[in-house]
Image: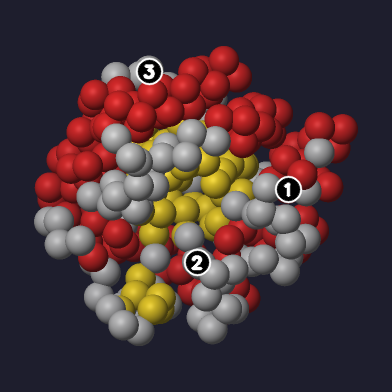
Amino acid sequence: MDNLLAFSTLGCPTWNIDTILSSAVAFCYNAVELRGYLTEMDLPLAVPFLPENRAETRQRFADSGIAVCCVSSSGVVAQGNLDHVKSHCALAHDLGSPLVRVFGGKPESRELALENLRAFGDAAHDTGVAIVLETHDDFSTGATVEALLAEAAHPAIFSLWDLHHPFRQGEAIEETHRLLAPTLRHIHIKDGLVDHGYTLLGEGDVPVFPMLELALAGGYTGAISLEWEKRWHPEIADPEVAFPQYSRLVREWLARR
């Protein structure tokens, strides 16, 4: 399998580094996306990710055979919280992660959005990583993300296809892929039902596998990352249930294709 299979720590808010790594191995993942750690959402402030501890943490991931595929920040283009994004770019660099995720938010103006996004891109470029803008908020479709990235025209800014959001906006999956494919560097997967929240894979109506087929057939080589939103939705299944289920079904699908 060429694509890394990952889970986001958003889905396991009570797990420490020991449990994150042992579970990744046990559940047949080969990467982790960092999004919060225990009670701390600002990753560079969490103990394993303090500057003095990063070399040890990076080595622990390497010793476990687990990559850090993305450092997911709370950076928002509309807010222009540049210092926050810079700190996550530095963390990504120190952990050997190629990507830092940001959101678009709801910018007051197009000009402000472009100015802030380019500043995020400069911060990433300066630390040898890249920014991925997620299909989310006012940029929940491939059309809106593609348009902003095209206008920003920055060499360190790419797209993140959260499969859930464009689908819920009614954008055809083929259109989302066509628009994002040239810049696509990261994918979030999750299944769910309207008005019923997130579900285990195959129990919702999100066409996860047809979308993954579009991406992989189109040459996508990045990570496939489960974004199980347990931190925000404590009522959904525990990671001990969801993580192995998603891993098993995705790996079975990959083996068949």
Q: Is residue 27 left or right of residue 22?
A: left
What x and y, as percent, mark residue 24?
Answer: 64, 59
Of 8 and 137, the residue lying toward us: 137
Which residue is at 35% across, 84% downward? 196
Q: Name the element at disc 2.
A: loop
Q: Name the element at disc 3.
A: loop
Which residue is at 12% across, 47% downward? 175
Q: Which residue is mark 2?
A: 228
Q: Which residue is mark 1?
A: 64
What x and y, as percent, mark residue 40?
Answer: 72, 56
Q: Which residue is mark 3?
A: 155
Q: Is residue 20 visible?
A: yes
Measured Cα–Cα span from mark 3 to mark 1: 32 Å
Neighbour tally class for label 2: few under 14, some 14-19, many 20 plus, Cα within 10 Å: many
- What residue type is disc 2 on? Trp
Measured Cα–Cα span from mark 2 to mark 1: 22 Å
Compare marks 2 and 3 and give the one earlier in the sequence: 3
Question: Is mark 2 in CB contact (under 8 Å) with mark 1?
Answer: no
Of 85 and 127, the residue lying toward us: 85
Quadrant in the picture for residue 156:
top left
Decide: is 157 above or below 35: above
Decide: is 110 above or below 44: above
Q: Residue furthest front?
A: 108
What x and y, as percent, mark residue 186?
Answer: 41, 42
What x and y, as percent, mark residue 150?
Answer: 23, 26
Neighbour tally class for label 3: few under 14, some 14-19, many 20 plus, Cα within 10 Å: some
Compare marks 2 and 1 and give the one earlier in the sequence: 1
Quadrant in the picture for residue 197:
bottom left
- What residue type is disc 3 on? Pro
Which residue is at 40% across, 76% downward? 198
Of 75 and 166, the residue lying toward us: 75
